[in-house]
Amino acid sequence: MKKVLVPLPDYGFDPTEAAIPWLLLTAKGYDVQFATPGGYSGMADLRVLRGEQLGIWKWLLQAREDAVMAYHRMSNSESFCTPLKYTQIRAEHYDALLLPGGHDKKMKAYLESSLLQEVVAHFFTAQKPVGAICHGVVLAARSKDPRTGLSVLHSYKTTALLASQERMAYHLTRWWLKDYYLTYPVTVQAEVTAALGDPAQFLSGPLPLSLDDARHPERGFTVKDRHYLSARWPGDAYRFSAEFIHMLEHA
């Protein structure tokens, strides 16, 4: 049974981007192991999970019912309730790495972890499957190849949360949520693009006007380059998960 490592912060990850891949991976029989900073169960961004304080944009910004149900199943699973500490991760024990996103400020403990950046670098050096979605691509972009000192994504094509998506969510809610939708002053797209050898390696894909689902994964958008797979937002989660599983099956 292939083992997939999914590191998370203590709080703030996107429920769709973690739970839909978990649901589909475990349905295929993969062993999914979580890790958090202190080895305690993580918690998704409750504002996204429950739609709290999202006002008239709740229908657009809240996690969908299928993702909420998947999250509750995941959060009651043994592996989720007994995560490793970041310090206990042994990257060589895993066959693949999956990096969910999320924009809450408490994501910074995950995005800025030097321990996780070393783990990411190990997977790229070993050319094991790596999947990153949304802000998870930021963690990959910040991880350095020990042989070159450059980002592990330097020579890869990738996508990530688009600047247009990030700014739209910010402008829709900034009057009452302030900068909740801006994890950093620099957008995800800008930071990731700066880590690449050529800005043309960042692929935006079609306009993200609709969410994919189990029956319509083709609505999602992903970029695959060798052993690395990336996606932009929760609306790509089903396609992202299906293609990540395909990578594992053929690794």
Image: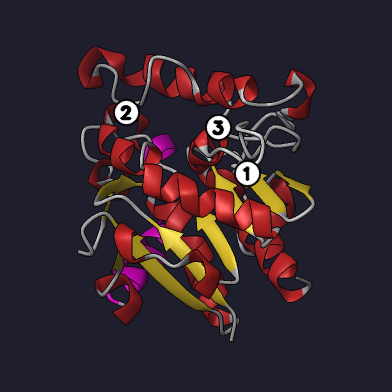
In depth, the one of 2 and 56 nearer the eye is 2
| Category of crowding for the residue at label 1, using alpha-carbon neighbours closer than 10 angstroms: few (below 14), some (14–19), many (at least 20) | many
Residue 56 is tagged as 2
Q: Amino acid at mark 1?
A: Ala
Residue 67 colored in magenta in the image: yes
Describe the element under mark 2 as helix, strand or loop.
helix
- Give the magenta part as a residue range: 59-76
Closer to us: mark 3 or mark 2?
3
Closer to us: mark 1 or mark 2?
1
Quarter of the rendering occupied by the N terminus: bottom right
Q: Which residue is mark 3?
A: 161
Compared to 102, does 6 lie above or below?
A: below
Measured as percent of width and height from the top left, residue 219 is found at: 70, 47
Measured as percent of width and height from the top left, residue 38 is found at: 21, 58
Q: Disc 3 and disc 2: Cα gap in Å?
A: 23 Å
Q: What residue is drawn where x is 68% and y is 50%?
A: 229
Measured as percent of width and height from the top left, residue 121 is found at: 57, 48
Q: Earlier in the sequence, mark 1 or mark 3?
A: 3
Q: Disc 1 and disc 3: Cα gap in Å?
A: 8 Å
Q: Earlier in the sequence, mark 3 or mark 2?
A: 2
Q: Disc 1 and disc 2: Cα gap in Å?
A: 27 Å
Q: Amino acid at mark 3?
A: Leu
Image position of 187 (left or right of 160): left
